[in-house]
Image: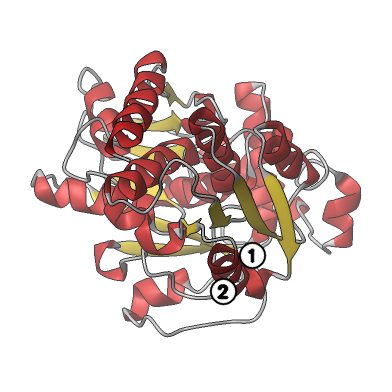
């Protein structure tokens, strides 16, 4: 057993050593004035999203805890991107992987899970937790449970985590200590890492949660209450949850902004015109909240950092599809107008 553990850790570390860090892109657009906005581009990881970092950490955590061995099937509940990344690492280690995903998950994500050798088990969104536990017990496997372990599997003090990497890349910029970090939450693991890091290093930076419709995280951040639930799943894949996940730590959030789904979709389409490539819907949620903060800070000289969580190629049937937008009864026009206004005035009008 120990020999396999040593080999597995070495394989994961070798894979990490072959990978470059993600880029920090300065957003070039009108209306910003003396405010610098940066996008930490997590879509450039081997599996195309920031969940690659999480999956690596979760596998190392489970292996070093003795929960995963040479022949252990791995089961995960996921809306897609975490499952894609975990399928990658399961294949690297020669392990069976099953993703328990909501039926609404994009076909592109399902194909990527299968591409890396994983199997997809589609269920109703509310059933992903119990079905994952059931499968793990039935197969004598390990339920990875990202929603519980995301906040503790990553070394939040440093070790080239997403926070340390971001601040290192900012070191030569005019305003190297950002006023705000802006991030959505799915498990809550990334916001936990960011919030802990800035506190541990006694930085004045504040953390803003960007939360979509049909998510309880905004209310949890405002009230610090953890027993909130709501019945409808988020339409912005990867972020927003119908319950407060164990890895979400409300006390680390300095401010929360609720973002309409139509604003998220309008933002990723708007961003495509600037970057000349597509980003996922959660990036739109992050950007809308970032521009709202920039609007409030107009006239100041400072920097803001947000995150490109994944690429938009996974969402050509949804956020970039006019028929899907129409079916969802989203009206993007007022948000498009607001974004155009921001580029001219630096103020994001209320919609």
Quick check: can you spot residue 348?
A: no
In screen coordinates, is 248 left or right of 31? Answer: left
For label 2, count other residues whose C-alpha is less than 10 Å away and answer few (under 14), some (14-19) or many (20+): some
Is 305 above or below relative to 104?
above
Point out residue 102 in the picture as x, y percentages from the top left corner. 70, 62
Point out residue 52 in the picture as x, y percentages from the top left corner. 47, 36
Helix, strand or loop at label 1? It is loop
Q: Quadrant of residue 81?
A: top right
Point out residue 93 in the picture as x, y percentages from the top left corner. 48, 32
The residue that appears at 30% across and 32% down in the rendered structure is: 3
- Residue identified by numbered label 2: 242
Q: How many marks?
A: 2
Quadrant in the picture for the N terminus: top left
- Residue identified by numbered label 1: 234
Quick check: can you spot residue 96?
A: yes
In screen coordinates, is 333 left or right of 349? Answer: right
- The reply to whether callout 1 and callout 2 are in contact (CB within 8 Å) is yes
Q: Quadrant of residue 331?
A: bottom right
Quadrant in the picture for the C terminus: bottom right
For label 1, count other residues whose C-alpha is less than 10 Å away and answer few (under 14), some (14-19) or many (20+): many
In front of the other: 213 or 12: 12
């Amino acid at each position: 057993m120990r020999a396999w553990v040593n080999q597995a850790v070495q394989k994961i570390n070798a894979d990490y050593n072959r990978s470059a860090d993600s880029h920090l892109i300065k957003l070039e657009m009108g209306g910003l004035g003396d405010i610098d906005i940066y996008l930490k581009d997590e879509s450039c990881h081997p599996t195309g999203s920031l969940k690659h970092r999480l999956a690596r950490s979760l596998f190392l955590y489970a292996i070093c805890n003795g929960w995963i061995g040479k022949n252990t099937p791995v089961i995960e509940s996921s809306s897609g991107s975490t499952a894609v990344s975990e399928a990658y690492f399961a294949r690297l280690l020669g392990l069976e992987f099953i993703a328990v995903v909501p039926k609404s998950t994009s076909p592109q994500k399902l194909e990527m899970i299968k591409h890396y050798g994983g199997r997809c088990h589609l269920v109703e969104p509310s059933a992903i937790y119990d079905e994952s536990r059931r499968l793990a017990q039935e197969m004598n496997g390990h339920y990875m449970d990202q929603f519980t372990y995301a906040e503790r599997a990553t070394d939040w003090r440093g070790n080239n985590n997403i926070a340390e990497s971001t601040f290192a890349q900012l070191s030569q910029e005019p305003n190297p200590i950002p006023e705000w970090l802006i991030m959505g939450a799915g498990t809550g693991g990334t916001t936990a890492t960011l919030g802990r890091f800035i506190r541990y290093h006694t930085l004045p930076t504040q953390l803003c949660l960007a939360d979509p419709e049909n998510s309880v995280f905004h209310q949890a951040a405002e009230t610090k209450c953890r027993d909130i639930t709501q019945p409808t799943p988020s339409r912005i894949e990867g972020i927003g949850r119908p319950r407060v996940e164990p890895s979400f730590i409300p006390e680390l959030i300095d401010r929360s902004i609720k973002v309409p789904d139509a604003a998220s979709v309008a933002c990723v389409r708007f961003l495509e015109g600037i970057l000349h490539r597509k980003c996922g819907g959660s990036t739109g949620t992050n950007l809308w909240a970032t521009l709202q903060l920039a609007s409030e800070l107009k006239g100041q000289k400072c920097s803001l950092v947000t995150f490109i969580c994944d690429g938009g190629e996974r969402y050509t049937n949804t956020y970039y599809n006019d028929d899907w937008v129409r079916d969802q009864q989203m009206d993007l026009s007022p948000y498009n107008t607001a974004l155009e206004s921001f580029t001219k005035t630096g103020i994001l009008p209320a919609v």
